[in-house]
Amino acid sequence: MSNTNGTQATEEQILYANILNKGMLIGLVMLLVTFGLYAGGIIKPAIPLDQIQNYWSMPVGEYLEVINHEFLHLEHPPTGWGWVKLVGKGDFLNFVGVAVLSGVTILCYLAIAPGLFRRGDKAYGIMALLEAAILFLAASNLLAVGH
């Protein structure tokens, strides 16, 4: 596949783009479906829809403290991946699509690494694996800073 300036896209670039496109579509569909389930009242939210506007102007930390105190009643407010425990609530179910959209880049890097190594591009292969590892560690909350 060539672009307007005559350069060819590599096999890895096409693979990356295809995975990113499919992941984006899956994440978008998940966002639409989960939001429909939430907004349609099919899956009960943790915070009632008619009260959510009361919390929009709050900073995130304060919001989490308040909704935990008023609705969730957990030992600690849900931070990091804490939302996973609440995925049965419509408002937290929406995060699944966000997680898919956020994680698809990791899959892209993992998918292109073998081709880079096969082609002899060790440096790019290592960089792809390192990028995937760094993104995974950041997403896993294992590299939490400032706590």
Image (cartoon, helix red, strand yellow):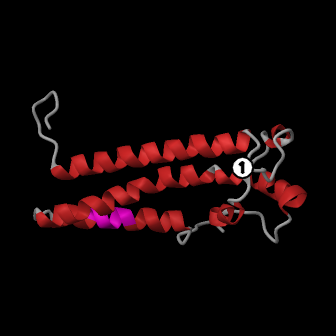
The answer to which of 115 and 76 lies nearer the viewer is 115
Where is residue 38 shown, x and y percent of the image? 71, 44
Main SS, magenta residues: helix
Residue extending furthest toward the right: 70
Instruction: Give, as a single range, the part of the protein colored magenta.
Output: 127-132
User: Along the horizontal axis of the image, is 81 left or right of 114?
Assistant: right
The answer to which of 102 and 23 lies nearer the viewer is 23
| Residue for point 53% across, 70% down | 143
Q: Vertically, is 25 above or below 138?
A: above
| Residue for point 72% across, 49% down | 91
Residue extending furthest toward the front: 42
Where is residue 6 shown, x and y percent of the image? 9, 32
**Residue wearing tag 1:** 91
Three-letter residue code for mark 1: Asp
Instruction: Name the quarter where the N terminus is drawn.
Output: top left
User: Along the horizontal axis of the image, is 125 left or right of 39?
Assistant: left
| Residue for point 58% across, 67% down | 145
